[in-house]
Image: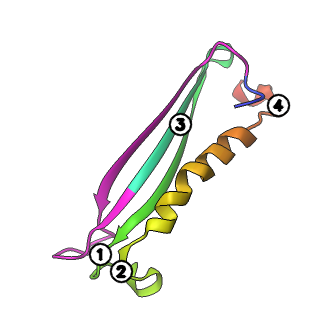
Amino acid sequence: MPGLPAGGYRCLCAGEFDAVKGRQGGPGAANRLSVLLAVLRLPHVATDVLITLHTATYIGPASAAAAHAGAGPKAAAAAAAPALMAAVLRGLEVRDWSLFG
């Protein structure tokens, strides 16, 4: 993370969860999503920055998303997520630190 001052805390976490849109329910409506989460603690401006990237890794056949994204595994999206998060973190730049007070 170039451009960020030294001395802060940086953490990257990954996880998965199942989600159902709105009031959809029943078998096959859940989608599996992966989440990448970056936490940047910036003590010199007394704040934290949280960056999240959610990616559908599986779309249930009864999900509303299946109509436009297709049901089933989404391996390409899941494989691309880490590189996308890395690019976001490499490109992160604070141009005006007064934003934080």
Q: Position of residue 13 (x, y in %)?
A: 44, 37
Q: In the image, what residue type sits under mark 1?
A: Gly
Q: Position of residue 25 (x, y in %)?
A: 20, 74
Q: Position of residue 68 (x, y in %)?
A: 47, 84
Tell me where the magenta segment starts and ends, as one range. 5-33
Residue drawn at the location 42% of the way across and 64% of the way down: 56
Residue drawn at the location 83% of the way across and 34% of the way down: 95
Numbered circle sitting on residue 96: 4
Looking at the image, is mark 1 or mark 4 nearer the viewer? Answer: 1
Residue drawn at the location 31% of the way across and 78% of the way down: 63
- Tag 3, which secondary structure? strand
Inspect the magenta stretch and tell me whether residue 17 lies in it: yes
Q: Which residue is mark 1?
A: 60
Alpha carbon separation for disc pair 4 and 3: 21 Å
Mark toward the start of the polypeptide (3 vs 2):
3
State which quarter of the image contains the N terminus: top right
Mark toward the start of the polypeptide (4 vs 2):
2
Q: Which residue is mark 2?
A: 71
